[in-house]
Image: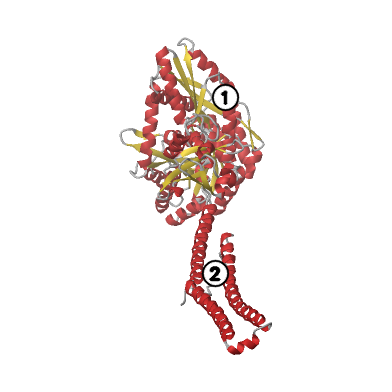
């Protein structure tokens, strides 16, 4: 391969050679003797012609070579211009093997490197612009050198407006710190507040790192910012929910206790009284059970609004749990504390007693209130709340809708209640529950026609716990479902034993709670128990109170009809104490009415009670429903009921509730003609014969 210099030397030598040859020829011609003939006028023309010919040949050779060189330079120039314009798509043609060819090859290599660099840069820009986080690349002096699209969206500025701007000017700087310190603080904390072009402030997470490079032009830092507005909003929400009740917007238990602690500390320092009231809605569970939890929540919202409206200024109210609220007033003088609480509780009772509108119906509720004072009753948060709670529970046990002041005796009752609630969970496991049977007697002839199963809790060290004490606790703890299933199994097991001893044990009744009736699987559970013990459902009677019956009439009717179709008899227990009407009563598949003992107790002495009992009996007879009088204790009551043509009765006049074995003995004796109540009814038979003969 000849170099460009060699080619130039060859072409130059060739031209010189042509010229030399031309002039040599001319010179030889001139020296030739025969050339004398040409001397004269023709000689100049010959010389000129030869010179012109030599020059023309030399020029032609120079033009041809120059044209080729110019074309190569033009191609190289065009390629360089395309590369300068950023077009790296067309490769540079390498057509020469000399220095220009080397230059072409070098330019092509440069194009390839620039093309690769451009692809890398475009890819990097694409990656950066695909990020949802804002990215800023800043020089050593803090000025922005590069920003992605997310940074433009976050700041509200174009990339051109961001380039060259001090990054620290984008951060909210209420303290007026120097730019470098502001950036360093944001990096250390990991968060900052960014101020947009429109003046809006946006909380961002902020992180940065230095760019490690030996090239000063690339030295600087890269920062990443992420909009954390939603996270900050969620954090505020979490902090709010940690201290306030989401439904009622009042302090929750934790925040209330915190505020109460501060009030107690102030009161102890200033020797003033802090009065605390503990509130619990009476029978609020029935609202949830009847109308649903959404309606119950709305009632709680309205209740909170009413409470706030009657409270003095600066009174703190909180929702402790469910339908339990508490409030306190601090800064009271000892002489006025009791009067202030009485006045406030009266206002609360009156406000709560107004009608609540639930699902287009009026519902009337009451509240039980317990009050305790600091420092008289307690000097710390836990004891003050516990004592007010004990007073509230005392109010509730005595009918509710009143305010009771705490006394030390109440704590003993509260501790006893807590102990029973704890031990009740183990009662089934430890076989502490027993069933006793109260015989049901035909008031016409004294025959035992069945019995009512009564649950007893035989707690070691405490004796028998009456149902009125532990059944409400079982319902609170949701243990009533397990207890109810156990009772049903026990009664079926006892009935099967009785059926092997006597021909007709009669019908056994047992109580059914609202929670049991609301079980979706209750019917299946009953059928399973009956099949397990091979007892016909027709031998059992389920007793339901009026309150349970009317809690959700539509659903209850469907459930009771399924039970009736199964063969189970149904009875309304404690009739007369609830809210059922005659028209409502006719809708339910009821076969028995049980008159509450509170009416039977004075029926033989008080005319109004006697009239009520007779009315119930007559109503039952007209509807074809059996009537059972509960709580018969005296012969006079028995005589009145017989004279009123009551079908059946039960009570202590026929003996205390007994074991299944004792009931079996009574039934065996009755089949043998030795009725246990023959003597009791003999007098009535004599009286009837005397009346007939008269």
Q: What residue sits right under mark 2 in the picture?
A: 92
Instruction: Note whether 337 is above or below 351 in the view shown.
Output: above
- From the top left corner, tell me how far across and down residue 484 is, in percent: 45, 45
Along the viewing direction, whichever of 371 and 3 lies nearer the viewer: 3
In the displayed structure image, the side of residue 393 where residue 367 appears, left or right: right
Task: Please identify the quarter of the rendering in which residue 657 is found.
Answer: top left
Mark 2 lies on a secondary structure that is loop
Determine whether 162 is above or below 600 in the image: below
The residue located at (49%, 27%) in the rendering is 396
What residue is pinned by disc 1? 308
**Dot 2 surroundings within 10 Å: few (below 14), some, or many (20 or more)?**
many
Residue 420, x across and y down, in percent: 38, 34
Please say whether residue 590 is visible from this viewpoint.
no
Quarter of the image that includes the C terminus: top right
Q: Against 183, is 79 above or below?
A: below
Q: Nearer the viewer, residue 384 or 233?
A: 233
Extreme-bottom residue of the structure: 34
Q: Residue furthest right?
A: 41
Q: Is residue 151 visible?
A: yes
Q: Separation of disc 1 and disc 2 at Cα?
A: 86 Å
Instruction: Kindly state the secondary structure of the residue where label 1 is placed.
Output: helix
14 and 552: which is toward the camera: 14
N-term-proximal mark, 1 vs 2: 2
Task: Residue 178 in the image: state x and y as whole percent.
Answer: 47, 32
């Amino acid at each position: 391969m000849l170099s460009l210099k060699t080619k130039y030397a060859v072409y130059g030598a060739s031209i010189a050679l042509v010229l030399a040859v031309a002039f040599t020829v001319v010179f030889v011609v001139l020296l030739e003797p025969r050339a004398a003939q040409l001397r004269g006028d023709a000689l100049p023309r010959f010389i000129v012609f030869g010179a012109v010919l030599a020059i023309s040949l030399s020029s032609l050779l120079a033009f041809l070579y120059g044209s080729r060189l110019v074309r190569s330079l033009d191609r190289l120039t065009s390629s360089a211009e395309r590369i300068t314009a950023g077009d790296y798509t067309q490769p540079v043609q390498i057509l020469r093997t000399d220095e220009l060819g080397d230059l072409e090859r070098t330019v092509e290599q440069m194009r390839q490197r620039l093309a690769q660099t451009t692809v890398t840069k475009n890819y990097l820009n694409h990656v950066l612009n695909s990020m949802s986080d804002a990215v800023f690349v800043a020089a050593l002096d803090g000025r922005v050198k590069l920003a992605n699209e997310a940074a433009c969206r976050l700041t509200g500025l174009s990339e051109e407006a961001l380039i060259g701007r001090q990054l620290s000017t984008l951060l909210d700087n209420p303290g007026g710190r120097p730019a470098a310190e502001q950036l360093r603080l944001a990096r250390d904390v990991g968060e900052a507040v960014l101020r947009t072009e429109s003046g809006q402030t946006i909380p961002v997470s902020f992180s940065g790192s230095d760019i490690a490079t030996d090239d000063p032009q690339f030295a600087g830092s890269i920062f990443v910012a992420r909009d954390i507005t939603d996270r900050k909003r969620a954090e505020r929400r979490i902090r709010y929910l940690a201290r306030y009740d989401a439904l009622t917007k009042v302090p929750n238990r934790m925040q209330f206790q915190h505020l109460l602690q501060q009030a107690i500390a102030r009161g102890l320092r200033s020797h003033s009284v802090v009065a605390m009231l503990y509130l619990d809605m009476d029978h609020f569970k029935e609202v949830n059970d009847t109308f649903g939890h959404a309606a119950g929540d709305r009632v709680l919202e309205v209740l909170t609004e009413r409470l706030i409206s009657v409270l003095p200024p600066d009174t703190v109210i909180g929702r402790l749990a469910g339908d339990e609220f508490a409030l306190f007033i601090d800064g009271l003088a000892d002489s006025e504390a009791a009067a202030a609480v009485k006045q406030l509780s009266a206002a609360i009772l009156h406000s709560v007693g107004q009608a609540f509108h639930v699902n287009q119906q009026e519902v009337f509720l009451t509240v039980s209130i317990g009050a305790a004072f600091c420092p008289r009753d307690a000097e710390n948060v836990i004891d003050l709340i516990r004592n007010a709670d004990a007073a509230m529970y005392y109010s509730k046990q005595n009918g509710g809708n009143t305010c009771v002041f705490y006394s030390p005796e109440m704590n003993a009752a509260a501790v006893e209640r807590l102990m029973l609630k704890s031990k009740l969970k183990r009662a089934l496991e430890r076989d502490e529950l027993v069933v006793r049977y109260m015989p049901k007697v035909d008031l016409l002839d004294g025959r035992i026609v069945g019995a009512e199963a009564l649950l007893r809790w035989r707690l070691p060290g405490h004796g028998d716990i009456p149902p009125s004490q532990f059944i409400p606790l079982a319902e609170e703890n949701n243990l009533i479902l397990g207890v109810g299933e156990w009772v049903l199994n026990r009664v079926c097991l006892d009935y099967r034993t009785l059926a092997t001893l006597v021909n007709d044990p009669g019908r056994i009744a047992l109580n059914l709670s609202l929670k049991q009736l609301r079980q979706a699987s209750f019917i299946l559970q009953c059928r399973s128990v009956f099949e397990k013990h091979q007892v016909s459902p027709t031998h059992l009677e389920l007793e339901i109170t009026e309150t349970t019956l009317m809690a959700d009439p539509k659903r209850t009717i469907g459930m009771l009809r399924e039970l009736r179709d199964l063969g189970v008899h149904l009875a309304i227990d404690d009739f007369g104490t609830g809210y059922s009407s005659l028209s409502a009563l006719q809708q339910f598949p009821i076969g028995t009415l049980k008159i509450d003992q509170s009416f039977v107790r004075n029926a033989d002495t008080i005319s109004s009670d006697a009239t009520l009992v007779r009315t119930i009996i007559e109503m039952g007879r007209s509807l074809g429903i059996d009537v059972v009088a509960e709580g018969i204790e005296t012969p006079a009551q028995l005589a009145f009921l017989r004279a009123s043509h009551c079908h059946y009765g039960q009570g202590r006049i026929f003996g205390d509730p007994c074991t299944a074995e004792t009931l079996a003995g009574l039934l065996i004796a009755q089949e043998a003609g030795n009725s246990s109540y023959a003597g009791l009814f003999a007098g009535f038979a004599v009286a009837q014969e005397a009346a007939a003969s008269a």
